[in-house]
Image: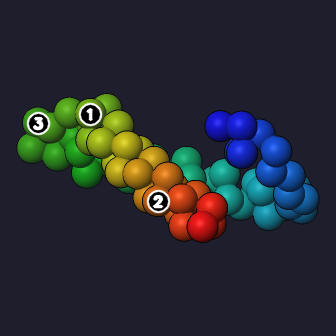
Amino acid sequence: EEKHASRQVTVPAVMLEKVMALAGSEMKRLYAVGSENGGDGDAFVREEREAMDVVLQALDGEHMS
């Protein structure tokens, strides 16, 4: 987290709005997929998030070398 706290980027507001809208749509899509056939949408989204965290950790480790 300390390494993440020191990162700074500049993103135009209009692009950030687009990214956030896409992220919101993707979260809704993941929830819908996870809820199909009586599944637990919240658990599915949580599992997807955990998988992304693993990928981010691997990428951070790759950049540290």
Q: Residue at x 30, y 42 (%)?
A: 47
| Mark positioned earlier in the residue sequence (2 or 3) | 3
Quadrant location of the N terminus in the rendered image:
top right
Disc marking residue 15: none
The three-letter amino acid code for the residue at tag 3 is Gly
Q: On the image, numbered disc 3 is attached to which residue?
A: 38
Q: Is residue 42 left or right of residue 49?
A: left
How far apart marks 1 and 3 lie (CA) works out to 12 Å
Percent x, y of residue 60: 58, 58
Secondary structure under the numbered disc 3 in the rendered image: helix
Q: Residues within 10 Å of mark 2 (few under 14, many from 20)?
A: few
Asked which colour scheme the image uses, the reply is rainbow
Percent x, y of residue 10: 90, 59
Q: On the image, numbered disc 2 is attached to which residue?
A: 58
Q: Is there CB contact under 8 Å for labels 1 and 3?
A: no
The three-letter amino acid code for the residue at tag 1 is Ala
Q: Residue at x 35, y 51 (%)?
A: 51
Secondary structure under the numbered disc 1 in the rendered image: helix
Q: On the image, numbered disc 1 is attached to which residue?
A: 43
Q: Quadrant of residue 61?
A: bottom right
Foreground mark, 2 or 3?
Answer: 2
Percent x, y of residue 15: 80, 63
Q: Residues within 10 Å of mark 1 (few under 14, many from 20)?
A: few
